[in-house]
Image (spheres, rainbow, N blue to C red):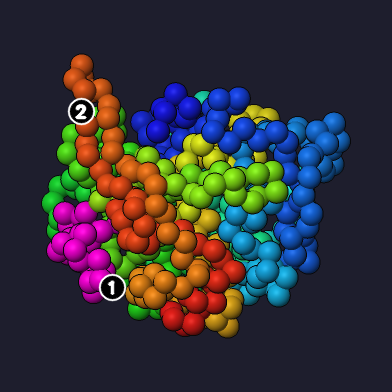
Amino acid sequence: MNRASSAYPSGGKRPRNWRRLAAIAAAAAIAIAAVVTGALAAAGTLTGSGAADHSAKRDHASHIPAPANGLTPAQVAGAYDLAPLAATGITGKGQTIVVVDSFGSPTITSDLAHFDAYFRLPAPPSLRVIQPAGPVSAFHPGDKNRLGWAEETTLDVEWAHVVAPGASIVLVETPTSENEGTTGFPQIVAAEQYVLQHNLGQVISQSFAATEQTFPSTSALLRFRSAYELAARDHVTVVTATGDQGATSFKYNMKDLYTTPAVSWPATDPLITAVGGTQLYLRADGTRRKPDVAWNDSGGGKSIAFGRPAYQNGVQALIGTARGVPDISMDGSCGSSVVIYGSFYGGGQWKPICGTSVSAPLFAGIVALADQYAGHGKARGLGLINPAIYTIAARHERGIVQIRTGNNTQTFTQHGNQYTVRGFTAIGGYNLVTGVGTVDATYFVPELAKLAG
């Protein structure tokens, strides 16, 4: 990847390991000439699309136009073939997506409403914000770490909603920042246990993690698995982003990278579905100009903490005895960023944003669609879907689209020295950049519902 085409988090130590704001304009790989205004309409069907009239207000709250250098809901809906599902009423209705983020965003309710009004999306049946691990301190726009988490939260909520506009959303905010090592995880585990004990949703979306090597020991990491064990028991699906440093990841100082392969937990946990990143090449109407490729910065590789789970036995030749990540992939590249709307900056702004922090909520939305398709209500979801994902791939079903180009090898300069961490290549089939590939939702949703239901 050309790093000059991507931008970086707003600042702070690390608001997110795998989310980057895309400061992309004419040089971006997806020079989008106009904003597409068609989206999933209130009735749950895909409306027509066309160039936006930026001189017109899209709602009563603001005249700020959405940027023309990020993908819109209509384009992403087109890319993942959501329209046939929406036409039959499969929009996530009756399901709840739980989004977990440190601190959250103080303006998420009004920002989602603005986003929906602009793109003509229906509001979710409900958006509930809870802080079960303790109250979050007051937000200050000058705090760059808090600003980064607010951006992350906005991304997670708005884009999970894009894919499953009929699903309710529970935003779980925790009072401490998740960094490397164990930092922030006690509060995250407590919050997720609350969610699970109170049956608040069928799928949990996480766009955070810590490099496995930054934990004091493997046993220290394993002590934080209780929420995921409870999720597996109660048939709740947990999806997690794999990271944005390709075949390596950050050290404990959150500045330096490991000069040997590294992956992050919880993505590596066998009880979680790890979601990597691809790059889309779309026309204004969401159709592809060429096939998706692996995003160079998509986190992927072999765990040093977990052995190969049974559902990966079919890819043993590639991963050996270790748990391999990712399992599956969605859009994440800074060459195919999506747009978010936030007003926590002190004024309403649209921004392009990228990273596997996009991939995870997109896939959480797909799972919510499959939960609805399978007929699951509040008390039960599909649960651990990884065995079904690998079965769908092994059967070469139409729902899995293989990725045949790209790699996640990383070359970087650190303390005056240049390093290359050799990664993995997407050549079709399972690989340690994109997993089994990406999805065509029209086929994948019923396939997943049948096999995991």
In the rendered image, which residue does mark 1 sit on?
Answer: 311
Query: Is residue 113 among what the camera can see?
Result: no
Q: In this view, does 10 lie above or below 114?
A: above
Q: Residue at x 73, y 70 (%)?
A: 87
Q: In this view, does 448 lie above or below 349?
A: below
Q: Which label number is shown at residue 419? A: 2
Labels 1 and 2 touching (C-beta < 8 A):
no
Q: What's under tag 2, amino acid-wise?
A: Tyr
Q: How crowded is mark 2: few (under 14 residues within 10 Å), some or many (20 or more)?
A: some
Element carrying mark 2: strand
318 is within the stretch colored magenta: yes
Question: What quarter of the picture does the N terminus occupy?
Answer: top left
Q: Is residue 86 above or below residue 345?
A: below
Foreground residue among 89 and 406: 406
Q: What's under tag 1, amino acid-wise?
A: Tyr
Please state the horizontal and vertical placement of residue 44, each as a whole percent of the image: 73, 66
The mark that comes first in sequence, 1 or 2, is 1
Foreground residue among 337 and 197: 337
Q: What span is in magenta?
A: 302-326
Q: Residue at x 41, y 27 (%)?
A: 3
